[in-house]
Image (cartoon, rainbow, N blue to C red):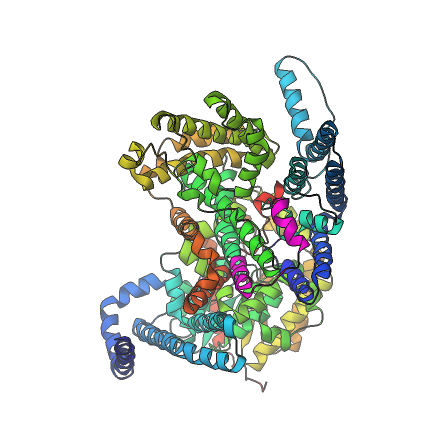
Amino acid sequence: MVFNSLTFFAFLAIVLLAYYRLGHRGQNWLLLVASYVFYGWWDYRFLGLLLFTTFFDYWCALRLEAESDRRRRKLFLAFSMVVNLGVLSVFKYFNFFAESLVELLATLGMTASFPTLNVILPVGISFYTFLSMSYTIDVYRGELKASRSPIDFMLYVSFFPHLVAGPIVRASYLLPQCRRARVINPHEVVNGVWLILLGLVKKVVIADRLAEIVNWGFAQPQPPFPDANSWLILYAFAFQVYGDFSGYSDIARGLSKLMGFELVENFRAPYLVTNPSAYWQHWHISLSTWLRDYLYIPLGGNRHGSWRTSRNLMITMLLGGLWHGAGAAYVLWGLYHGLLLAVHRAWCHLIGGGRESAGKEAATPAGGQSWLHKYLGRPLLIIVFFHFTCVGWLLFRAGAQPKEFSQVKVVTGYLHSMFQFPLASGASPLAGAILVLGGLALFFQGQHRLMDRFSQWPLRWQAAGVVAALAAIAALGVFEGAQFIYFQF
Amino acid sequence: MRRRVIFGAWGMLLIGWLIHVTAGAMLSQLIAARVGAALLRFAQGKFNDPALFIHRRVGELLWLITLAFVCAAMHPLLERLIRRRAGVGRWGWTAHAALGFALLNLWIGAAGNTAIFWGAIGAGAGFQNLMQFHFKRIVFEENPATPRAVLVGNSQTRAQIDERLLNDRLGTNLWTAELHFPGSHAYDLLLIERQLRRANPQFVICYLNESYFYNGTAGETVPNFFGVRDLLGNWRSDAARHLDGKGVFYGLLGDVLPLFRYREALSQRVLGASAVQLKQSQYNTALAVDLEARALEAAGKSRLGGESEFQKAAFEEFVARCQRAGRRVIILDGQNNPILTRQLDPAVRVDMEAFLNQMMARYSNLVVVPGTALPPQAAADYEDLTHVNPEAQSRFTAWLAEFMKAQLNQAPVAPMNR
């Protein structure tokens, strides 16, 4: 069941009708059942896996909290990590690692064969595993009390708006919302309806329309193409991923608001930033903060000099890439972003005289604007960094290529044609569509704060916004019920 | 200030109408004298009177502006009424938005009955099936020539018959418009028939082959033409079994929300034909080059059974409706590329011919021209399995022009009470 399907809206109507008539405990039970139905609709066989992960971490957290011995606590945490990551590895990474090892041995002149697993990837496994893991870690750190109620905890993990593609909401944020009676705030319900509409526009108008261009572009035997150039296809993909994933997050947040929940904001204006550090504070925020808090900081963060900081950044981003998919292309994508972060950090260090400034919109040395900011200007920096992001998206998209395409050929072919500047040969007939849809995506990014405050708009603007959204969905939408890109992660 | 602008706009519109009603025809003649030839060239035979065309388009433009003004004026009044009656309070924006969306659809629905809308959608944005269909339908409706004929069916009808050549040959004796819709089956002819009522042609010509009865029901006609009336008035008990549910749903939704029905045409206007038709072009390039392999695949889809009986019943209903409306249906029992014919189950052709003969015996308005009476076509005449090349098209159209001359001498079909 996907958010952009009629089945889902029928399901939602039934759930909401019952939800508003029930008390707090009843609501939790209802949402739990609804969430399992929602997940089982895709493949009921994996409900067992979801149940296992949930109960295992529920039990681990209780034991962790009951245990006073530090060593035993550590042991329980390690046990939890091994089991969670083990499940994830079996379903997501086993074949990748086995095949990679065979290839590595082959390059060393040795032959080996490993059995590969013939299993499909359970939808959203990376999301709910990380969600569940963060809970155990938080309990271990003493930042959170273990949940006594299995129902509340099950609901936290399986809550259907975020179950299959996030945002990865921390237990300390969502679990209390599951525990306490929720108040349905009419303003938030209005905002929720708007966010659902907005998410649908992003998905069926921006992402799914651009997907047609991107799929066509990556189905060509090799770039450059007669009708478009590689940069255009990558722009299209950049906006497609944004529309797809931020659309999903908006719908998830909107649905939660209808039920009195609040999920974290997952996207701000990722393509309107000037550096990689700011990018990761605006793109898939729930994942980047997860990686920061549970990986980067435990690795040492930026506390042990620039070399160790760069190493930690690279490791964090490499694993972040691997989280997205089991493939060399995703690993490279992660490494690429790690490299961008490390280089940017070094650059800030150099021009900022050692002052900590990474993560801000632009490197700002003591007291004023950086010379880069001063001479190139923010718009130019945005454009330049957007192109760096697009090169990263090339690696990411190559990871999704069908088996008959060589990922290396795709990447090298694109990189080759990207730097031949074929725009000079004339405007592509696809440029108009990418300009319109990309412009819409940028508009939503630029106005993301306004979009979140729909209930405060003047009445006429509210009506105009809704009519425009409905008209865009009806007239420009693609109604093939396309899956969200992040479902595969 | 705001009032002045509103009054000014209404005043201008009123003056526009006055000029159009009193001197519109004369002004159109004057404009046509200057640009008529270019317009006819651009229109590629879709109409033959440029002055009338210009006059009608100006009328449509004024009508659409008037309707937009009326909608804009009605919106606050209706919204106030709803708010007062329903007491929507905090949810006032929903009444506003629902009304706005309904009025927008009303306007788009009205615009869909004007050639100026479809012309604006198509100009510079390239070919789109629904746009072509409606543009030609509307222009055909306003053509005063009698008798008139329409060419209906799937792309094979379009490939086989050149309407422009036919109109050149038959001159003022018979004006023909080509209103094909790709992938049409017999049931789809039934849906198209409703679109012909305003134009009321005396002849309906279809180049028909096995694919109309024995090749499934999937296609683009149902989502684009199916409507609430088809569900309420003409729903056949077996339709639910044979028609694609999604297509029917899209058709119904499109009937209520014209914005949704015209989405492909509007998308093409906004995003450009290249972007919107990428999937189709991908499909076209993915088609097997080997015609033998394609013929084998196509023949495998042809089958006798419940679905073909459903299509036959729909065809009979189509003929019956045409008879009631006083239309002669001319069925050209068409051919395929011999490569495909060789692969098709001969029982299918036998069944179809027996059915058509049965229909001809039952309905006096039906003329079936057997395949043996049509000009023969060899494999070299085809561009693919079903579509002939321009030379074969010209030959066939010339033959059809002669055939239609003979038909014009026949007594017209008398309309029956509905």
| Position in image of residue A207 (x %, y %) | 50, 49
> From the image, which quarter does the C terminus of chain A lie in?
top right
Picture layout, residue A290 above or below residue A335 = below
Q: Is residue A404 left or right of residue B163?
A: right
Q: Is residue A23 left or right of residue B105?
A: right
Specify the quadrant of the image occupied by residue A101. top right
Specify the quadrant of the image occupied by residue B253. bottom right
| Position in image of residue B371 (x %, y %) | 59, 61
Say if the magenta span includes residue A203. Answer: no
Q: Which of B338 and A15 is in front in this view?
A: A15
Numbered-mark total: 0
Which portion, as a residue range, is magenta? A169-197
Specify the quadrant of the image occupied by residue B171. bottom left
The secondary structure making up most of the magenta span is helix
- From this viewpoint, is residue B280 visible? no
Residue at the location (73% across, 34% down)? A118
